[in-house]
């Protein structure tokens, strides 16, 4: 079955964890002992209902404060599709956790409290979703039961958010009025909102088209490992293992290995389950080539007439993720891009972006915790990259503190030409 990854987003106490708990509960994908534990904890907390948010808020601090701090991943499936949910926190100080959880998502659920409307953090998370290249955005106006399921409230918030979204790079935007607490329009259509003519949330998640979201044009396979089995049966075998980041590969295809530039053809493509006649993103495969070439980790296999950009000057949007210091010019970091690790220096901080107003502060000289800005980097070795909007795998990287080994920033490469 097809897999859909989606992330929840929005402001504090908009009901993200409750919505996920409702999805899990109404699709009958939680175990009996889990439900009993949640019911028991709900009673201990003094609530007169089963607090489904406890299904995802697992940290003691989360349960004590009634908030989400860390990213909680949950898995469930229906007869139509498999799902991985990233329940991300709403507090501004945990924006980095939201970026982490949403970085691999196909769809983002942005929740609004029907009583509070579009808040600063709602706009922040919607912008981050568009910056991260998430192709599908669903705005769930939650807690409709607290505004008497009023259509006028839903339409007002819908118009307000749509006006903001016109400034974002969002191609697919859907609006659904829900009550996560009572299950209205979550799994089944709600009788309390007969004026709403769209589908329930689960139906939309099952039907949203994601097959065309991946780049199937630009063939890219970063080499992760060289396979040389030590057995008599495969003593002449040399395979190059990695996860395909884009395009389609087939035995007999002409390919080029970068950065060396040597051209050859594909002999075989093998998976854990055996050889295949074609491979595409995001499959993990081992490719054998017709010629003996010097290929190692960090190289990339692609088409001779469709190559990524090769360069050392990287123009990127950076999200600074750590409290330990700031990002400023002349700083040096380790840089991890696909399977290649290099060193990099910050050449210039071009501007800091206000994610609430989308204003560019060109006087800024540094980025602090959770801040986003445009930065120029110079790497010690060339990277083999595409624009992030074209390929999220080959267009993204992380910066690593060379002293502590901690990840300090996430980057999305902007287009600069060859």
Image (cartoon, rainbow, N blue to C red):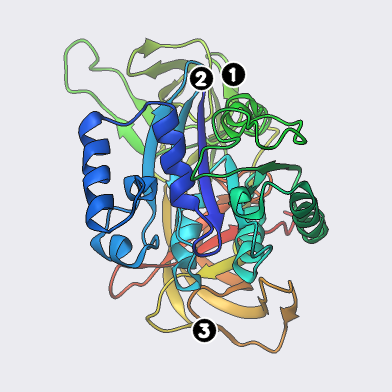
Percent coordinates x, y for residue 14 in the rendering: 54, 58
Assign a secondary structure to mark 2. Answer: strand
Give the residue at mark 1. 253
In the image, 191 versus 23, the foreground residue is: 191
Percent coordinates x, y for residue 220 in the rendering: 56, 35
In the image, 2 versus 278, the foreground residue is: 2
**Closer to the N terminus: mark 3 or mark 1?**
1
Pointer 1 with pointer 2, Cβ within 8 A: yes
Q: Is residue 367 left or right of residue 286?
A: right
Pointer 3 with pointer 2, Cβ within 8 A: no
Percent coordinates x, y for residue 302 in the rendering: 58, 33
Pointer 3 with pointer 1, Cβ within 8 A: no
Residue at horizontal 48 percent and vertical 77 percent from the top: 369
Assign a secondary structure to mark 1. Answer: loop
**Closer to the N terminus: mark 3 or mark 2?**
2
Judged from this view, the residue extending furthest toward the left is: 231
Q: Disc 3 to disc 1, how far (Cα)?
A: 43 Å
Residue 330 - label: 3
Bin the neighbour count of mark 2 within 10 Å (Cα to Cα): few under 14, some 14-19, many 20 and up.
some
Residue at horizontal 29 percent and vertical 75 percent from the top: 403
Residue 370 - label: none
Give the residue at mark 2. 266
Q: Nearer the viewer, mark 3 or mark 1?
A: 3
Q: Is residue 117 above or below residue 387?
A: below
In which quarter of the view is residue 165 placed? bottom right
Percent coordinates x, y for residue 56 in the rendering: 35, 48
């Amino acid at each position: 079955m097809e897999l859909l990854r989606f992330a929840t987003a929005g402001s504090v106490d908009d009901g993200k964890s409750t919505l996920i708990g409702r999805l899990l509960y109404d699709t009958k994908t939680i175990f009996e002992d889990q439900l009993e534990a949640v019911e028991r904890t709900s009673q201990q907390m003094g609530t007169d209902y089963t607090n489904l948010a406890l299904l995802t808020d697992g940290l003691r601090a989360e349960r004590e404060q009634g908030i989400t701090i860390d990213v909680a991943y949950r898995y469930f499936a229906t007869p139509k599709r498999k799902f991985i949910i990233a329940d991300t926190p709403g507090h501004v100080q945990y924006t980095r956790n939201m970026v982490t959880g949403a970085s691999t998502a196909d769809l983002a659920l942005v929740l609004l409290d029907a009583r509070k409307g579009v808040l600063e953090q709602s706009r922040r998370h919607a912008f981050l979703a568009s910056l991260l290249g998430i192709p599908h955005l669903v705005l769930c106006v939650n807690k409709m039961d607290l505004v008497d399921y009023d259509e006028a409230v839903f339409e007002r918030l819908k118009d307000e958010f749509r006006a903001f979204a016109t400034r974002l790079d969002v191609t697919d935007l859907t609006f659904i009025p829900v009550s996560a607490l009572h299950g209205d329009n979550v799994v089944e259509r709600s009788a309390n909102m007969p004026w709403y003519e769209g589908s329930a949330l689960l139906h939309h998640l099952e039907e949203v088209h994601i097959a065309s979201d991946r780049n199937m044009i630009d063939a890219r396979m970063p080499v992760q490992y060289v396979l040389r089995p030590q057995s008599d049966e495969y003593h002449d075998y040399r395979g190059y293992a990695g996860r395909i980041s884009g395009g389609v590969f087939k035995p007999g295809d002409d390919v080029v290995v970068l950065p060396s530039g040597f051209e050859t053809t594909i002999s075989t493509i093998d998976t854990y389950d055996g050889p295949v006649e074609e491979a595409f993103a995001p499959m993990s495969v081992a490719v054998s080539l017709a010629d003996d070439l010097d290929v190692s980790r960090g190289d990339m296999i692609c088409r001779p007439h469709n190559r990524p950009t090769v360069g050392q000057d990287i123009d990127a949007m950076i999200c600074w993720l750590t409290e330990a210091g700031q990002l400023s010019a002349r700083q040096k970091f380790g840089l991890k891009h696909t399977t290649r690790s290099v060193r990099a220096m910050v050449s210039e901080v071009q501007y800091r972006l206000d994610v609430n107003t989308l204003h560019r502060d060109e006087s800024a000289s540094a980025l602090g915790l959770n801040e986003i800005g445009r930065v120029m980097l110079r790497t010690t070795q060339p990277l083999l990259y595409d624009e992030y909007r074209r390929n999220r795998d080959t267009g993204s990287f992380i910066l690593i503190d060379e002293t502590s080994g901690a990840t300090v920033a996430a980057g999305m490469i902007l287009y600069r030409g060859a």
